[in-house]
Amino acid sequence: MEIQSLFSGFCSNSVIPSLKKDSLSSSIPSHSYLSGLNQSDNRVCFKPQCFPAPQRIKSVIRLESKNSVEKVSRVVFEKEDSKSWVKRKRLAVFVSGGGSNFKSIHQACVEGSVNGDVVVLVTNKHACGGAQYARDKGIPVILFPKNKDEPDGLSSDGLVDALRRFEVDFILLAGYLKLIPVELIQGYPKSIFNIHPSLLPAFGGKGYYGMKVHKAVIASGARYSGPTIHFVDEHYDTGRILSQRVVPVFANDTAEELAARVLREEHKLYVEVAAALCEDRIVWREDGVPLIQSKENPEQYY
């Protein structure tokens, strides 16, 4: 499929006013981007940048991803003086609202604390705050799914095709309220992550989002809450848990107060997990539980 025809459904001026025909084609990488191509300040830079990978770890199953294809390798006691490098990852972020977690991740990428770049934003609401932020930063915006409110949106297969053309490695859901289609999950196995504002598996599932979660936590009498980052499967909030952060629930909390406390931790946690992901520090225990390898001490996992 020609690039022009692929993007004709969602790159209209009303959706991505900052992208013109000539700049759109240069925003979508070809396989030659690893040769060190640099583009203008307003576009994605495809020159590879690398961070040293952890040098000595125990025998684990390591998850790596390149151009949407999962690679699992067994790593056993690498030599301490070995030099391995991790290429800069290409991230797609999905939002439905203001996109505060998206902004935190993007800023961390720009500042260098995350070894990756947000190369495309996907949203089901073309006028949401996250989409506007992306346009302001020169990040291409894709509408998904196609419906009566967003007639320029892509189909599920079209979305997978578009993300592959952007050579996306990992997908980060950051306040995206639509169920992820099975076509995308199959196209990006163990490469899609979501953040949820409660300690899953509690207060998760269909209908638990936004302020509804915090109201339910308070009504239950729970003393603790906090964000959870998990792998995405075919259902709401049921994928393997990767990381959590605990915050207290105070006796006189309102839902708004609890939401603000949890959101502050969300911003920190998602950046930490994105950094680990982009440095290939996500590993799998033999029983199928995902863990994060410590950057400071590669012998430790959490």
Image (cartoon, rainbow, N blue to C red):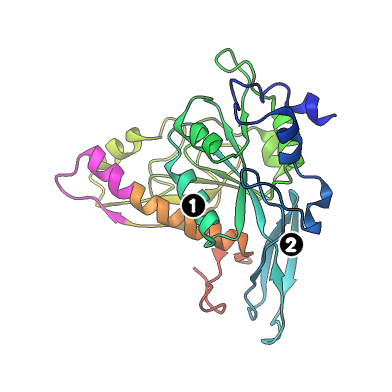
Describe the element under mark 1 as helix, strand or loop: helix
Q: CA distance from mark 1 to mark 2?
A: 29 Å
Amino acid, disc 2: Val
Seen as rendered, the residue at the extreme top is: 148
51 inside magenta stretch: no
| Residue 33: image tag | none
- Give the vertical position of 262 relative to 160 (above or below): below
Residue 267 in percent (x, y) is at 41, 51
Viewer-proximal residue among 234 and 31 = 31
Label 1, on which residue? 107
Residue 254 in percent (x, y) is at 20, 39
Label 2, on which residue? 72
Describe the element under mark 2 as helix, strand or loop: strand
Viewer-proximal residue among 190 and 96 = 96
Q: Specify which label sits upstream in the sequence, 1 or 2.
A: 2
Seen as rendered, the residue at the extreme left is: 252
Residue 116 in percent (x, y) is at 61, 56
Amino acid, disc 1: Gln
| Disc number lying in front (1 or 2) | 1
Residue 252 in percent (x, y) is at 14, 44
Q: Which residues are magenta?
A: 247-262
